[in-house]
Image (tube, coloured by chain):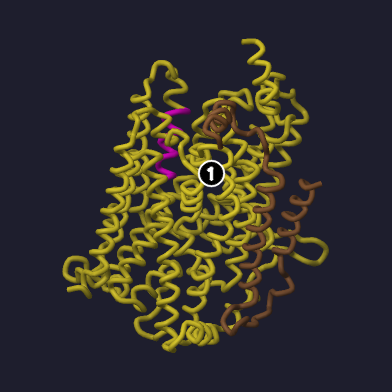
Amino acid sequence: MVERFGELTIIGLYLLLLLGLGMAASRMFKGTKSDYFLASHSIGPFLLLMSLFGTTMTAFALVGSSGEAYKVGIGVYGMLASSSGIIHSLCFFLIGIKLWSFGRRHGYTTQIQFFRDRLESDRIGLLLFPILVGLVIPYLLIGVIASGTVIQTMTSGSFPDLFPTGSPGTHGGIPNWLGSLITCLVVLTYVFFGGMRGTAWANAFQTIVFMVLGILAFHVIATKLGGEDTLLENLRKVTAAVPDNKLTRIEMSKMKFFTYLLIPLSVGMFPHLFQHWLTAKKASSFKLPVVAHPIFIMIVWVPCVLIGIWATSSLIPEKPPLPSNPNAILPFLVKTQTGPLLGGLLTAGILAAIMSSLDSQFLCLGTIFSNDIVTHYYGRTRVSDRGQILLARIFIVAIVAITYGLSLFPQRGVFGLGVWCFSGFASLFPLVFAALYWRRLTKAGAFAGIVTTIVVWGLLFWQSDMGANGEFAVKLTLGETTYETMPVATIFLSSLLAMIIVSLLTKPPSESTLGKFFNPQREHALQVETD
Amino acid sequence: MKRYSIWALVVLLLIVHQDNWLWDNGTLVFGFMPIGLLYQAGISLASAITWFLAIHLIWPTELDPPEVASSEIESGN
């Protein structure tokens, strides 16, 4: 009985616990929109660290990192993890704190409100809205689909008569469509009732869960595969059996590795992170996340990368065969190398990583729709706080339903879409950076940068067979050498150039706008004098 | 000077992140840790140290809006 339903019981209990947490958060709800969207700016350093880390670490952190390491070896850590440690914290330090400060001074809830003010343009919101939503949806899809895959793999064998599949890795497991539906409903419930406070609490809890259980998985899998007495002996035995090409980066392009550095800049433009930044109680709340983020990434990624390369070792049992999908490597190893109790806990850990990103993204899309579209055009004074919260909740339900509906269609390399989403957001980074640090950025320059991003992104995406070609690279020939670069480098540079050239050719922003964003202390002093 | 030193450190981190010299080195440090992975984990630690220095040496002041700053003064923080 325990063998058959062990995982299922633990996953069920974990999901119930999350629902309880969301409900507890909703009991503290003050009924205002500031409380629902931004937790009344009450989040301190620890919760901010956990929610920012949980949000940036998606399904990719546990499932994708081990899957990619299995495919390409240890190079995935430098490409995705250590680079993020430098650049995410850079974004928190240079972008996050400043945006938080402007958000507090001028009452912003979303990025679009900031850009409308800074660029003196109402239409910039209409241009950004579909782009931000369009780039977040594939990102959401990755999480929803990954949760279905994980639940099916981990519950295989539980219901052989009810859900037969014929494949040994999934036979009798809760089908994808049902696993994804359960995940969506759980996240929807705690976001719907708990708002930002529920999301932050759930994120913090889930971040602790996936960090602790990730380390536990590392220890248990090493022990099972090695079969020796001590952890060190096991680590030595398992890693010694890994082929050389996975211990080095001989199969990885140096130029692709280098240009991948631009991808983590996407964090500067993620709309859901903007909203998390604004929840901070004070500027100093950012200090802990800025310092601890790279260490947290290391704690999660190093064990996952090692597990991924171990899956290529000669010590892996021949039966059952390894799954063909690299993203199923971690759930597969957890399922085959651990018992049902630990298997259930580790599944909860993987789901935690997935859901801690989904929740913020769902909430943020609801917030953008309510704030920047309906309330903005219908009139802020004509929609009460309750009305705005109701609108956001309706939109959140709609987005969850649409994402879930899309996840039911056969997906062609949906994980490959992730890097395209990140490339889009990263190429918009020059816009947010210039808006904060370059007085000369103009409305027309911003439009030029955004439109160039869409056009170049669309062109390269089309050339990559709509993202299906995972090896797609932009080739640059210098002399007799051809370099492979990530598409993000071309999109980023085109967007940056278009923004700078057009800004320099057009009329600078008004003095009042420059005063508001480049000398807020002086503006405040002038305001006090006038009063 | 402090500002330049911190930003120079960040640029240095980005440069040494591209560790071409370890590309095809499969040495296992302590018998289990691939040297390329250990080096990049070291970059993560070096990032944390750099950002620790940044928040102590070049933390931007006067970012808290007046109402937050005054509430902090009142609470004695």
The colour applied to the residues of chain A in this rendering is yellow
Residue A485 falls left or right of residue A10: right
Give percent across and percent down for residue B3. 76, 46
B53, A101: nearer the viewer? B53
B35, A282: nearer the viewer? A282
Instruction: Pick out the residue farthest to the top.
Output: A530
A114 over A332 or under it: above or below? above
The colour applied to the residues of chain B in this rendering is brown
Q: How many marks?
A: 1
Q: Residues within 10 Å of mark 1 (few under 14, many from 20)?
A: many
A186 over A105 or under it: above or below? below
Magenta highlight range? A360-372
Q: What main secondary structure does the magenta stretch of the protein show?
A: helix
Which residue is under mark 1? A270
A146, A50: nearer the viewer? A50
Give percent across and percent down for residue A306. 52, 74
Q: Magenta includes A54?
A: no
Is residue A156 at least partly visible in the picture? yes
Is residue A126 at least partly visible in the picture? no
Instruction: Pick out the residue farthest to the bottom.
Output: A228
Q: Callout 1: residue from which chain? A: A
Q: Residue at x 59, y 25 (%)?
A: A117
A374, A15: nearer the viewer? A15
- Under circle 1, the secondary element is loop
Give the position of the C terminus of chain A as an image quadrant: top right
